[in-house]
Amino acid sequence: MPVLRPFALAFALALPLLLGACSVLKPKGDQEAAAARGEPPAEGPPRYEIVVEAPRALRDLVAENLDLARFRTVPAEQGLTDEELARLVDQAPQQARALLRTEGYFNAQVQAALEPAPAEGKLPRVVVRIEPGPRTHIDAVSVEVDGELRRRAEAGEPAAAKLHERVRKDWALPPGEPFRQDDWSGAKNAALVQLQANGYPAATWTDTQARVVSAEQRASLTAQADSGPLFHLGGLRIEGVQRYGETAVRNLADFAPGEPYSEQRLMEYQDRLRLSGLYDGAAVSIDTDPALAAATPVTVRVREQRLQNATLGVGYSSDTGPRFSLEHVHRRPFGQDWTARNNFAVGSQRKLWEFDLRSYAQPRLWHNLVAGNVETLKSADEDRFSARLRAGRTQDRNRLERTYYVEAQHARVDSPLGRSEAQALTGNADWAWRNVDSRLLPTRGQAVILQTALGYARANQADSGPFGRVYTRLLAFRPFGDGWNARLRVDLGQVFARTGVGVPDPLLFRAGGEESVRGYAYRGLGPVVNGVVTSGRSLFTASAEVAHPISRRMPALWGAAFIDAGNAADRFSELDPAVGVGVGLHYRSPVGPLRVDLAYGVDDARFRLHVTAGVTF
């Protein structure tokens, strides 16, 4: 009953490779000096083919890791003589058995032989024949955590008891699973990381064993850890601050000295620093010396952004056409702890100026804000001018973003139906909840956006009066199968008001275009009055999409297929969903996805190309 401790197992795997490597190349002169420097030998044409006769799952493992594969292109004059090749062939069974043991095959039968070329113009073949035999499976697992975590759990502390139980429950290599060295290492790493990330960063393994009974194809695992002390957070040590002061750094922290250490809390803090717009980079770490566990200092290193920067851009949207943009950011206007952002976009269909003025983080992560925009938008059925101004407060806690504000809005619409103008003053509450694996490139999780408004509207061609507005977007991302990913989206909106009340057009709804119903023109779906598409008070759209990387060589390039449906109407009872189907090519860049979709609008019986960038939360 051999006991494979980590060092012993590594030595068992490495020994045949070392023996084979030591016997092969005997460089001379310059070649000897090159070998001493660790440089690979010169390559020539292949000397032989390697054929591994084994189950498909094991072929590449053996074929790619034998010394035979490493020296297949070494010329004879470099040291790979016929005698040395014969020695490599003799060593191949021992190396293959060591490799197979890492996959749980401890009784494999392996033979290797050098065979002549099967035909003229072909290469000689080294044939490795493998009978792997039965695979070893796990029959017993013992995972224990000693130290302070265990003492706290036995004393009845809920957090300690929950973590202690979770480490054992979440063990990644349970009884019944095949024994693989990679899985064994991965299970140990995952359990240790779980301890280290949840208050015990000094946790270590004190004993790990894999007892293998090769004759019975069973293995028992033992993993014993010492949690070390529970770490508590101390004060912040801030480095790299020059322009924007330490207060901005401190107010973005949502923890206080004395709280138990949590890696997730510090990573969320690090993300907030990076997303604040004040820093090019940020790193948050602690000192894991057990002597400092009672109050370990939290070191925050930031690299500040410039005081001002301007960005010129040229872009294209299938919704609004080509555009030229200019964005200017000032991170301390008039010497105040605020950030001012102005964005100008000029295009053939849309012209926009928007500004955002918000304070540095206040206590409890709140920011004061003043924002607004002025926009002109042209489409087939209308020319719209709109302007808005809002003032309020916003808070972003990584998963939950809340914004409360008062907004004044004005809109003027010129269409074949005439000119209409409306104004509104509203009180608003917006929430965005995200639980996704990445805010830039999500593949797993869900998100919910909810916008609510209560206000009073007045118009030149309609009645004045109170109204309410609700809009929500639901998103879900799910991986499935072999590398596939699904994306589901639902949008619902409703304006509540008496029939005659004139609500400003930007607060009403239309469908069609990117992030709506592909296959139709931007804002091309809505209630039709005298042949003219108008905005409605009710909205429903939905989308289902599946995507998969096109090839392993280009994992960032995905192909997609989708179906969209939805419309806007004056009442949900009058809503007639339009359907669009299509395929797309999506590039998952480091700054977000770029999507090019070809969609067919079933109701319009025509194709449209849609180009989008980023994910709309």
Image: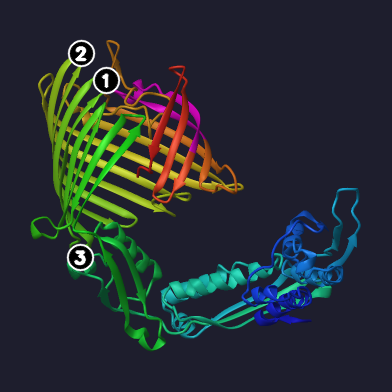
Q: Position of residue 475 (x, y in %)?
A: 41, 43
Query: Which span is picked out in magenta?
Result: 561-585
Residue for badge 2: 417
**Three-letter residue code for mark 1:** Thr
Residue appearing at x 49%, y 86% in the figure: 147
Q: Position of residue 600 (x, y in %)?
A: 47, 23
**Three-letter residue code for mark 2:** Leu
Mark before the other along the chain sequence, 1 or 2: 2
Residue appearing at x 54%, y 72% in the figure: 191
Majority secondary structure of magenta residues? strand
Quick check: marks 1 and 2 in contact, CB under 8 Å? yes
Residue for badge 1: 534
Residue appearing at x 61%, y 48% in the figure: 482
Residue appearing at x 18%, y 32% in the figure: 467
Which residue is more in the foreground, 128 or 262?
128
Give the quarter of the image for residue 571: top left
Quick check: marks 3 and 1 in contact, CB under 8 Å? no
Residue for badge 3: 248
